Amino acid sequence: MSHPRPLKVVILAAGQGTRMRSGLPKVLHPIAGKAMVRHVIAAAAALNSQKTVVVVGHGAPVVESALADLADAGVQFALQSPQLGTGHAVQMALPVLQPLPKDGQVLILYGDVPLIQPETLKALLQAAGDGVGLVTQHLDNPTGYGRIVRDAAGVVVCNVEEKDATDAQRKITEVNTGILCLPASHLEAWLAALSNNNAQGEYYLTDLLGMAVQAGIPVHTVSPQHDWEVAGVNSKGQLAALERIWQQHQAEQLMIEGVRLADPARIDIRGALRCGRDVSIDVGCVFEGSVDLEEGVRIGPYCVLRDVTVKAGAHIDAFSHLDQAEVGADAVVGPYARLRPGSTLGAGAHVGNFVELKNTRLGNGSKANHLAYVGDATVGERVNIGAGTITCNYDGANKHRTIIEDDAFIGSDTQLVAPVTVGRGATLGAGTTLTKDAPPDALTVSRVKQLSLTGWQRPVKQKK
Ligand code: UD1
Ligand code: CA
């Protein structure tokens, strides 16, 4: 493998995307929770692109502000208005691409062809060398694509667009995917020589192929590892189809790593999911952001996990929703549990049905098994939180903390009016409304004394 040449990348993203029927610019529509153009930018980054220029046009300010965070990563913008063709788009990128390294390569990608993989692009750059590289594909039905014309020896001669093609050329099944690598040293001169003298009156980027051949510079072709890598998105239907293909691909990768999926067609990963050994995931789960599932973790059906770490051996049962939470080793969560941001469970903790935690630490071995809200609380170890317990953490203006020390027992239907502390080993009687600290080891109860009236008679229905 020869040493990689300096690389700059141009991503064409100026087109309108009329068929998306959306106010959102096409390249911002998400695949796996991430704007299509961000997938392409990530592929460029994986190739160590020195600079990545996104050519924007329709919805340019929206696209630029949606990608503003990438400025530090060497992503810049060029405006193409009006859109006079793919060659014109690269012309508009040229000033931003400067300076062009003499022995460098310029790679052309597309904001609406989101799933191109770095492996295919590396093969393309390698094949191109100091010549031209083009990703082509053989299609049973090549309608609509540019056709790759080869001579009798099989050497690429040029690309001809469908609308400019002869009947014989239209029968060619090798098509241009659009993804192209050009030698930086020739780019300026070739772009300057483009004309729009063709059926569509556009400046065709693909005319550079013919120019290269004329100049004696060979055009090398590679095909993608997977057909879906070069699939473009023009409609919501194509967006959904590509989403499923990508989810299926991610599911296959997980299974290769040893994860047990109840059904690889029923999982959605919108971010990065890392799994240890012997993880199993039931149907219908959604993983967002950065999720880590350590060894032996089991996820029940229809759970949503966003930015979550689940330590070894823990179980998340059906219909649980976890957001920015950490679950300790061998803990049990759900069914029907909700862990909101800032929830951390210690080892062996239990959070059961219809329990909501927010910004709360539940220590090792502590349990809140049914119907509770625990917010802004620090709960020690081996604490039992009874059904119906509520931390009253919000006074209408400010949030306050509740502290429950080790081995405390919180009786059912208790309200803890924060700020308040329950001492180590304390017991709160059922129904307590705790407004002052509960001392350690004592029983604290706040309820009206129980009263029984022996002579009392039930009312009886009056006869009419
Ligand atoms: C282009 C290729 C064709 C190839 C096909 C693959 C040319 C002349 N033709 O055709 O050989 O088979 O892609 O899908 O390149 N864009 C701009 N500015 C423009 C025009 C286009 O940014 O002025 C962007 C579009 O947003 C889109 C991409 O370039 O992402 C391709 O444009 P499109 O008009 O779809 O190209 P095709 O005519 O399909
Ligand atoms: Ca076109």
Image: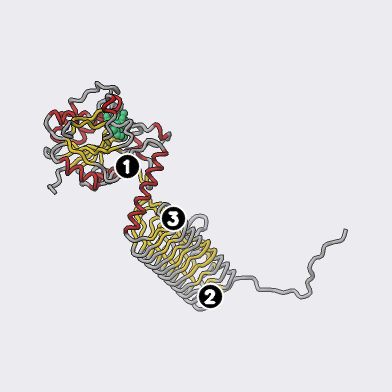
Residue 114: mark in rendering: 1
**Earlier residue among tags 3 and 2:** 3
Judge whether residue 357 can be spotted in this image. yes
Find the residue positioned furthest to the front: 152
How far apart marks 3 and 1 lie (CA) works out to 24 Å
Q: Are marks 3 and 1 in contact (CB under 8 Å)?
A: no
Residue 285: mark in rendering: 3
Label 2 beta carbon within 8 A of ligand 1? no
Q: Residue at x 14, y 43 (%)?
A: 5
Q: Secondary structure at mark 3?
A: strand
Res 80 quadrant in image: top left
Q: Say which of 433 and 23 sits in front.
A: 23
Neighbor class of circle 1 (other Cα within 10 Å; few <14, some 14-19, many 20+) is: many
Q: Secondary structure at mark 2?
A: strand
Residue depth check, mark 2 versus mark 1: number of the one nearer the observer:
1
**Depicted 57 relative to depicted 230: above or below:** above
Specify the amino acid type for callout 1.
Pro
Res 231 quadrant in image: top left
**Earlier residue among tags 2 and 1:** 1
**Depicted 452 relative to depicted 360: above or below:** below
Specify the amino acid type for callout 2.
Thr
Find the residue positioned furthest to the top: 197
Specify the amino acid type for callout 3.
Cys
Q: Is residue 176 left or right of residue 346?
A: left
Judge whether residue 91 can be spotted in this image. no
Q: Which residue is mark 2?
A: 427
Q: Residue at x 79, y 74 (%)?
A: 455
Q: Are marks 2 and 1 in contact (CB under 8 Å)?
A: no
For the C terminus, give its image quadrant.
Answer: bottom right
